[in-house]
Amino acid sequence: MKKVIMGTETAALAAVLARVQVVAAYPITPQTVTVEELSDYIGKGELDAEYITVESEHSAMAACVGASATGSRAFTATSSQGLALMHEMLHHAAGGRLPIVMLNANRALSPPWNLYCDHTDSLSQRDTGWVQYYCCDVQDVMDSTFIAYRVAEKVMLPVMINLDGFYLTHTSEVIDVPDQEEVDRYLPPYDPVDKVDVDNPSTYGCVCGADLFSSLKYRRQMDTLAVEQAWQEASDEFAARFGRSHAPVQGHNLDDAEVVIVTIGTAGGAAQLAADALRKEGVVAGSLNLAMVRPFPHQSFRQAVSGAKHLVVLDRDVSYGGEGIVAQEIKSCLYGKSSAQVHGFIAGAGGMDITEELLADMTREALGGQKQGLELGDSIWIKVLP
Amino acid sequence: MNSKILKQELLAPGHMGCPGCGASLVMRYVLEVLGPKTMVVMPAGCWPTFVGLYPSTCLRVPVMSVPFATTAMAAAGVRASLNRQGKGDTNVLAWAGDGGTFDIGLQALSGAAEKNTDLIYVCYDNEAYMNTGIQRSSATPPGCWTTTTPASAPKVEPKKNIVEIMAAHRIPYAATASVGYPRDLMEKVEKAKGLKGTRFLHILASCPTGWRHETELTMEVARKAVECRAFPLYEVWDGVRWSLTPMVAKTPVADYLNMQGRFKGMTAPQREVFQTWVNEDWERLREKCGDNQAA
């Protein structure tokens, strides 16, 4: 069924179609519509689930932990400050190997207050052990939610679905909404091998010694690294059923590309247009939408940029004292494996639009053209006051 | 307690609590009433260390160990999940110390109680952060020694009244109990078990390690606290109907204070403050209970 629908509404509808069983959430701009819609779906009986209207995001994730550990499919949604408040619980959910799926609306962290898109909120949670997927459009929000549960419940790790604040949360697009039966065939009910249960008393999360602790971390790393492949397979199966692919790495004209513009989130559309425009100028450009940042999709990324000489990387975030976080990740991935030059640009935070022109200009600067921004450390900052 | 009374023993031998630990006995009595169809959710504190090193456990019921601030809401998630699975008859026991209840877990507890979440919340109160080595909590009585309220910087504030806070949520049942009176404790757990919604039990758990008393005095100290009214026993229904539990005649606080090293350094004025706090709280309580029990 075709439908005109907004990003946050889509996240709620996707949760309904995924037949989540427990929702615990707290509103925050620009995510709020998702929790409002879910209350209404559950209130009207259109989703047979328990809704816990928690008093904070920390409690939202705590309730999801309780629900997931006892064998229910759990969902929550947050943004920015809320995600930061959850930080302790993010570690806990991943360490507890709980397949919770969460929407995060990417928004700047205070101070100063700013409600608009910035990726520092989620990227600064990259070491918590959550799988992180960044949506490029509204259809991606719908589809990746189903893929997320498929992957999460296979590898027993939580997944964060990220939506650029306002650019995606508040944009309406025509999307294809799959039938419930189709979703059910793709995503069977959650039936964990292990759960906290009175019929089989055991402990969850209690104290353990050093050897076991290290071994559990090792196993977790092993399973996290396997997500790239698991997601690719789940995406391939999704594509076979629904005709749409949502791979960890999504390329545009990469086969012969010498210059690749790399973005996460909604900037991928502008990056494609910029690459196309640059081709007309004789620059052999392509673009790469890095949909998955954790685990970093090493295999597919290296393969996708194997022919590139220059990578122009956009960061809507910064690791203070380091550089753009995506640029850091890419350098780490390519170190010793590629001679491509990585050009890190920091732009688009706090509501600054990323346009085709801006990305084309960054690329021209990377190739020796006119300076666009201010160089600081290993990054070039665009549209900042000196 | 006599094994003729405890039929189930859901607390297995070999737990890792200190000798004479009151909190371990509280669990023993509470589980005796709630039975094996109980899921325990507990945060950091003394108790998760008692459970033992994975995969060992001293509890014959499942236990989830969750972050400090989350007990009530993690339990609420468990409740929602069990309800969704048609397991409404499984007890969810949220279990935290005074630190996890009065302080860091209070927001989540209020969140769960405000929604009358169907769970039994037990606060085992040993009046300080004992697991980290005896630091003050807001449940520590005035003038009491802890490592963060040493003689040079004594605690002047009275003990926070957690039951008044919980009663203000108009939950169906809130009660105090002392490990020194197991029968009364278990009767109150039985009453709680028979109700739905948020049920709150504030249970005094004497702690030889932190209170500085002999391990064989655990029960006696916990009884003396009740006798002197430093820890009176009462129940509150629906947040409004208050009822005193019959207690022996009131005794001076000195009998209680003198049994414990933690009160040894108290000056005469500090003892006055302690007695005043006890008297005032007791009078307020009697008023609420409409009681004519001897002052």
Image (cartoon, coloured by chain):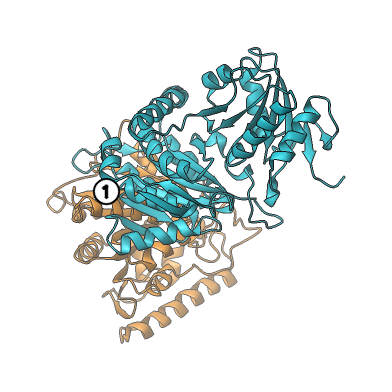
Chain colours: A cyan, B orange
Q: Residue at x 50, y 77 (%)?
A: B276
Q: Percent from the top left, x then y, of residue B84?
A: 24, 53
Q: SS for tag 1?
A: strand
**Residue A158 appears in the picture as rendered:** yes
The answer to whether A189 appears left or right of A151 in the picture is left
Closer to the camera, B35 or A108?
A108
Q: Is residue A239 left or right of residue A113?
A: left
Choose between A119 and B47: the one closer to the eye: A119
Which corner quadrant of the image does residue B233 belong to? bottom left
Give the vertical position of A142 relative to B26 (above or below): above
Residue at 45 percent across and 68 percent down: it is B254
Give the residue furthest to the front: A280
Q: Residue furthest right?
A: A386
Above or below residue A54? Residue A266 is: above
Residue toward you, A129 or A252: A252
- Can the viewer see residue B259? no
Establish if A338 lies above or below A207.
Answer: above
Locate residue A125, reporting x and y percent: 56, 39
Q: Amino acid at mark 1?
A: Met
List x then y, in percent, for residue B158: 52, 70
> Which residue is the site of mark 1?
B39
* Chain letter of disc 1 in the image: B
